Amino acid sequence: MNNGGALEVRLGKRVQDFRKKAGFTQQELCHKAKLSYSTLAKIERGAIKSPSVFTMQSIAQSIGSSLDDLVGGAIYGKSKEFKTSKSGVKFVYFNVNDTLVRYHQRAFSNLAKDLGMQPDLVETAFWFYSEELDKGQLSLDEFNKLFAGRLGVPSVDWKKYYIKAAESVPGISNLLDKISKEYKFGILANMFPGGLNALMESNKIPELNYDGIVDSSLEGVTKPDQKMFKIAQKKAGLEANEILLIDESMSNLVAAQKAGWHTLWFDSSAPEDSITNVLKSLE
């Protein structure tokens, strides 16, 4: 007997209907969306209360649907009116690495220490395959094998080191919570498959009602490619000059400017100043 609440049951039925309409078996969708079979099965029978927005985004992307269409506004939809800043911004996109979380040097250092190697050798080997990983052209298992092979070691578990090293940037949760109540907002990230889910499940980034999630590993393209910004603009449903990108990478910010967006540089080493600048820009 299904023990899920009415809302969860309705959502599960929508997921099942959309999956079948798209021609996927449960196993096929699990493989494409990088979900466990048990997770999808529980969602479809309404046994998971408010499943992760990142999980639902993965399902929607995999079956060629939007998040809004898939959930029908039942869980993540918003009906209130939101602000427009003095500069015309209506939607705020946040980068993840070195904006919402910090991790790079600590993850590389920890892995290098465990392997008995110099950090620069580990980092060089990582970046050799990272773009293919972030585009979803490599699965995490395939990346780990290539990464380990380049280092000359039996195995590497990059996700374990990444999640352990990642820490929420101080003050960022409060900033996201405040912005979520005043503006439409979302995530625009170069991220390995399943990375956003892992960050949320480990409480490194907050689970909020994001209005748009653009995950490079699902889209097959990474920033600063202009295709990434076109996808993000479509998800936002707004004009380019109504969108603000907050990011630590100058190449990403320049690309966003060329796309017609507003931009703001975020320095995760000085988060208080950066958060103050974000709030001032959204007055």
Image (tube, rainbow, N blue to C red):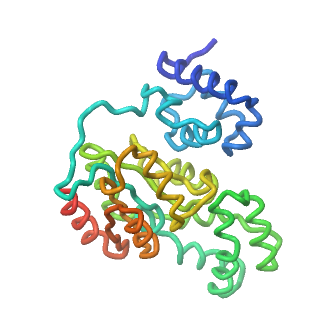
At horizontal 65% and vertical 32% (from top left) the residue drawn is 40
Name the outermost residue toward the top.
1
Q: Can you say which quadrant of the picture contains the C terminus?
A: bottom left
**Residue 46 seen by the camera:** no
Q: Tell me residue 136's x, y (percent).
A: 67, 57
Q: Tell me residue 132's x, y (percent).
A: 68, 65
Q: Can you say which quadrant of the picture contains the N terminus?
A: top right
Q: Tell me residue 184's x, y (percent).
A: 32, 45
At horizontal 70% and vertical 79% (from top left) the residue drawn is 125
**Residue 40 seen by the camera:** yes
Q: Tell me residue 99's x, y (percent).
A: 40, 65
Give left or right: position of 50 versus 163: left
Give left or right: position of 272 versus 5: left
Location of residue 157 by image quarter: bottom right
At horizontal 71% and vertical 83% (from top left) the residue drawn is 116
Give left or right: position of 258 versus 193: left
- Return the residue nearer the eye: 150 or 238: 238
Tally of marks: 0
